[in-house]
Image (cartoon, rainbow, N blue to C red):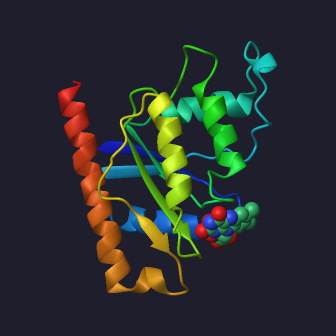
Amino acid sequence: MTIKVGYFVGSLSAQSINRKVAEKIVELASNDLEFVEIPYQDLPLYNHDLDGDYPQAALDMKAAIAANDAIMFVTPEYNRSVPGALKNAIDWGSRPWGQNAFAGKPAGIVGASIGAPGTSMAQQHLRNILGFLDMPTMRQPEAYVQYEEGCLDTERTQSFLKAWVDAFQSYIELWHRANA
Ligand code: FNR
């Protein structure tokens, strides 16, 4: 069975280390998982005055979320929290009230940082948000990547990311079986 996984990279940078990590996860995952990146760089800042007239970029993003069986977030930490651009995308996806596109989609979180905290605080904040959005979110294993040049080519990092994505696949399958 093919499982469709949409993923958000929490950085808009063309050189994003988090996108590199996401692409490595896609490469290491089993063929049962079909990944697609969900773009959000064209979204305006969320404003609930627009709830009755959603911008096309937000409608497209919500449709992309709905088309997937699960959602993966691969995000940096900005000032000990979730990057504003990613939070803005999540806010658009969650509204109008009662039409939350994320509800019931199993989620997995990964983060890469150049620093020792390895996005742990951003990930905890993101868990708080996803809990409210009714996303069943894999708790273990966690994935905090302290990024160094070349790390994605090492056996150590690859086996770590492979174990994470295999666990995420099992989590998604279990959740969908239980809720079929
Ligand atoms: C950072 N960085 C950072 N790192 C960290 O471990 N904890 C933090 O709180 C922050 N805060 C922070 C704020 C802002 C505005 C920037 C631009 C950066 C450093 C961050 O880990 C590094 O820039 C990564 O390369 C960001 O990931 P991407 O964009 O390369 O995927």
Using the rendered image of the protein, determine whether residue 142 is visible from the camera's viewpoint.
yes
Q: Residue at x 62, y 22 (%)?
A: 95
- Horizontal relation, residue 41 to residue 132: left or right: right
- Horizontal relation, residue 80 to residue 24: left or right: right
Q: Is residue 31 above or below residue 66?
A: below
Q: Is residue 110 above or below residue 175?
A: below
User: Who is closer to the viewer here, 39 or 89?
Assistant: 89
- Horizontal relation, residue 6 to residue 30: left or right: right
- Dividing the image into four quarters, tell me where ligand 1 lies: bottom right
User: Could you tell me residue 35's position as x and y percent?
Assistant: 43, 51
Q: Is residue 171 above or below residue 178?
A: below
Using the rendered image of the protein, determine whether residue 14 is visible from the camera's viewpoint.
no
User: Who is closer to the viewer here, 135 or 36?
Assistant: 135
Q: Residue at x 30, y 58 (%)?
A: 141
User: Could you tell me residue 154's position as x and y percent?
Assistant: 38, 86
Q: Residue at x 29, y 75 (%)?
A: 159
Q: Quadrant of residue 20?
A: bottom right
- Horizontal relation, residue 46 to residue 127: left or right: right
Q: Residue at x 37, y 41 (%)?
A: 137
